[in-house]
Amino acid sequence: MVWYRRTFAAVVAVAGILALAIFLRLRQPAGAERPPYQEIPPLPTSPQQEEKEENKPKNLVFSAPERYQAVTVHGAELAGKEKVIALTFDDGPWPKTTAQVLDILKQHQVKATFFWIGQHLQNNPAIGRKVVADGHAIGNHTWHHRYHRVDAATAAREIDDTAALIFKVTGAKTFLFRPPGGNLRNGLAAYAKKKKHTIVMWSISSADTNRRASAQSIIHSVLRGAHRGGIVLMHDGGGNRSATVRALPHIIAGLKKKGYKFVTVPELLEMCDKELKSTAASQSVKPVTAQPAVE
Ligand SMILES: [Zn+2]
């Protein structure tokens, strides 16, 4: 009878092992074969890390559609129903006032275009990075802001050195150029055109560099001159711009009340380009005011 007992013990043992195997199998959740690390989202970053991420140079390019390259634009004549306007700020980045302008723009969810002076960016790189991080467009406004005539080599240095610094500090490339003092004849705009930049002038001056300018006069100049597709000239740097800062919330509120939406210069030119393309057959839309090369 010994073999009976041995067989019985063996059967019990096999049954036990099978039961254990089934038990363990049932305890395994579905999909347990996949490594669990595939399911785990990345660890949340600390605010400091996020800040660093935000300040990392991005692959940004500020440019206009092809038809506006190597062309001078003063504003747009849009036939569409949308009322848009572009605010621009020159001569920064500048301590205090640029940050104040950025705060006001952020508060009102407005994007603008900033034309930088190379030497000012060199002195205030962190402010420059903040402008780009906030989503505004950037243009080149030369290194020294010269009004007088410059030779070709100087013009190249003024524009190329500024472009190189903008890229080094922010990672952005810009093909938008605004000549200092709006001077189209001293050799700077001619060089920028040769480099296929868009020469961005303005159609509405805030006259905020006028020595007698007050917040009230700045508000009045902009609201009186406002028009669909307009480009507004203001300054966030290069001197005491406290009147501009005081005027800005009222300018934004006044323009919003008139039904305007705010766009950057590249966005404005993109809209013009689209409108021209969609109505190309009828030729009924006037393009952005353009001038041929001056020199
Ligand atoms: Zn300027």
Image (cartoon, rainbow, N blue to C red):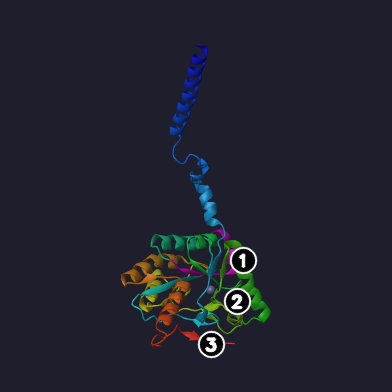
Q: Which residue lies furthest to the right in this view?
A: 153
The x, y position of residue 37, in whole percent, is: 52, 42
Residue 124 seen in render = no
Camera-side mark, 1 or 2: 1
State which tag comes first along the sequence, 3 or 1: 1
Query: Which region is colored magenta?
Result: 111-126
Per the image, the residue denoted by label 1 is 165
State which tag comes first along the sequence, 1 or 2: 2
State which tag comes first along the sequence, 3 or 2: 2
The x, y position of residue 63, in whole percent, is: 52, 73
Per the image, the residue denoted by label 3 is 292
Q: Is residue 286 magenta?
A: no
Give the Cα distance between marks 3 and 1: 29 Å
User: Disc 1 vs disc 2: Cβ atoms closer than 8 Å?
Assistant: no
**Pointer 3 local density, CA inside 10 Å: few below 14, some 14–19, many at least 20:** few
Q: What residue type is labelled 3?
A: Pro
Residue 102 seen in render = yes
226 w.r.t. 55: above or below: below
Q: Residue furthest front?
A: 1
| Residue placed most toward the observer, 126 or 148 | 126
Q: In which quarter of the image is residue 196?
A: bottom right
Per the image, the residue denoted by label 2 is 146
**Pointer 2 local density, CA inside 10 Å: few below 14, some 14–19, many at least 20:** some
96 w.r.t. 295: above or below: above
Residue at the spot 53% in from the left edge and 78% down from the top edge: 198
